[in-house]
Image (spheres, grey):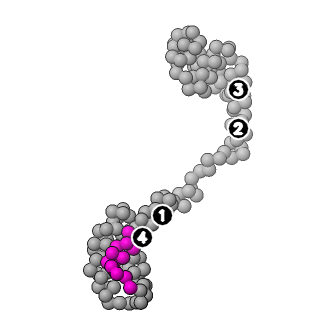
Amino acid sequence: MSDDKLQLYLAHRAALLDYASPIVGCRARAEDVVQEAWLRFSRQDADTKISHPASYLYRIVRNLSLDHTRRMATEKVQPGGEEMLTDLPSSCASPEQAVTQQDELAVISRALEALPERTRVAFEMHRLGGFTLQQVATHLGVSVSLVHQLVHDALRQCMAQLEEDL
């Protein structure tokens, strides 16, 4: 290992840290990048002639910093993330929950079929279709307060049917 390389590194170390810090986002990561750059720079064969060693060292730091930033962006590293993922509940319903949900859906479907058509349409448009009460009222040609009452009646009927059947 050449003393010239070491002297060059030591002379530029603080500036290299200042150069890498904004790229990688913090001083601690910049320390790691500059250390890795030193290792790569120092491994160059003595026979290899580098015309501008300081520029070459800065280029190594820049490339390593950008590589680190890209890697962090694609990995989206979260400390302890793996453990957090194993502790999260599954987004899939268990077989028992799936059967219960299917049963509830069937009950609600039967309850909706038993409703008067205007009540069912008001409920489906507002609660399932995302229409405002005003839009439903305009479509049905009734007042907003009547639509509100129709939707409320449909909800009450569905809840009563669920309590009765399950």
**Residue under pointer 3:** 109
Q: CA distance from mark 3 to mark 4?
A: 60 Å
Q: CA distance from mark 1 to mark 2?
A: 44 Å
Q: Nearer the viewer, mark 3 or mark 1?
A: 1
**Residue under pointer 2:** 100
Can you see residue 129? yes
Q: SS at mark 1?
A: helix
Amino acid type of disc 3?
Ser
Q: CA distance from mark 2 to mark 4?
A: 54 Å
Against 100, residue 8 (above or below) is: below
Q: Position of residue 62 (x, y in %)?
A: 38, 69
Q: Residues within 10 Å of mark 2 (few under 14, many from 20)?
A: some
Image quadrant containing the C terminus: top right
Amino acid type of disc 4?
Leu
**Span of residues in magenta:** 49-63
Residue 71: mark: 1
Q: CA distance from mark 3 to mark 2?
A: 14 Å
Going from N to C along the chain, the mark reached first, 3 or 2, is 2
Q: Position of residue 56 (x, y in %)?
A: 36, 76
Q: CA distance from mark 1 to mark 4?
A: 10 Å
- Residue 44 location, quadrant: bottom left
Going from N to C along the chain, the mark reached first, 1 or 4, is 4
Image quadrant containing the N terminus: bottom left
Magenta stretch prevailing secondary structure: helix
Q: CA distance from mark 3 to mark 1?
A: 50 Å
Q: SS at mark 4?
A: helix
Residue 64: mark: 4
